[in-house]
Image (spheres, rainbow, N blue to C red):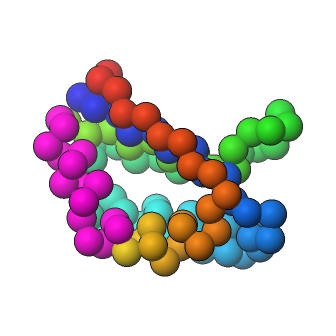
Amino acid sequence: MLRHVVLFTWTEDTAPETRAATLAALRRLPEEVGGMTSFAIGPDLGLREGNAHTALVADFPDEEAYRGYATDERHLAVIAEHVTPHLAARSAVQYEV
C-alpha cells in the first residue's frame, strides 16, 4: 500500500471561506476520482506556530492507483482552481505502508 501525504500552507490573504471551499473541493476527490482506500483532510488546529495550514493523507493500494489519481483531469482541475491560486507552500511525500 502507498500513502500520499500533502501539507498545504495558504497565502496570508486567503480568506477563511476560501479555505473552507478548498477543503470541500478536495474532500470530493474520493467520490469524483477514486482509487484510494482511505482519505482524510483537515485544517491545522493551531497548536504550534509555524505549522502548515492543512494536511491531506490518502492511501492507495499500489503505485498505479496513485498515479491514476495524480494525473486524473478532475484532480488536476481541483488543484488548478482551488489550490494553486491560494498556495504559499506545498510539501508532499509518498511512501509504502
Picture residue at 19% right of the left edge, 37% below the top: 63
Q: Position of residue 77 (x, y in %)?
A: 37, 74
Magenta highlight: main SS: helix
Horizontal arrangement in the rendering, residue 13 relative to residue 4 (left or right): right
Q: Position of residue 90 (x, y in %)?
A: 57, 49
Picture residue at 62% right of the left edge, 62% below the top: 87
Residue in front for this viewpoint, 87 or 72: 87
Above or below, 84 against 50 in this view is: below
Q: Is there any visible trace of residue 49 in the rendered image?
A: yes
Picture residue at 63% right of the left edge, 51% below the top: 89
- Quadrant into which the N terminus falls: top left
- Quadrant into which the C terminus falls: top left
Q: Position of residue 82 (x, y in %)?
A: 53, 73
> Is residue 63 inside the magenta stretch?
yes
The image quadrant that residue 4 belongs to is: top left
Horizontal arrangement in the rendering, residue 26 relative to residue 38 (left or right): right
Residue extending farthest to the top is 97
The image quadrant that residue 51 belongs to is: top right
The image quadrant that residue 22 belongs to is: bottom right
Picture residue at 26% right of the left edge, 71% below the top: 73
Q: Is there any visible trace of residue 43 in the rendered image?
A: no
Q: Which residues are magenta?
A: 62-76
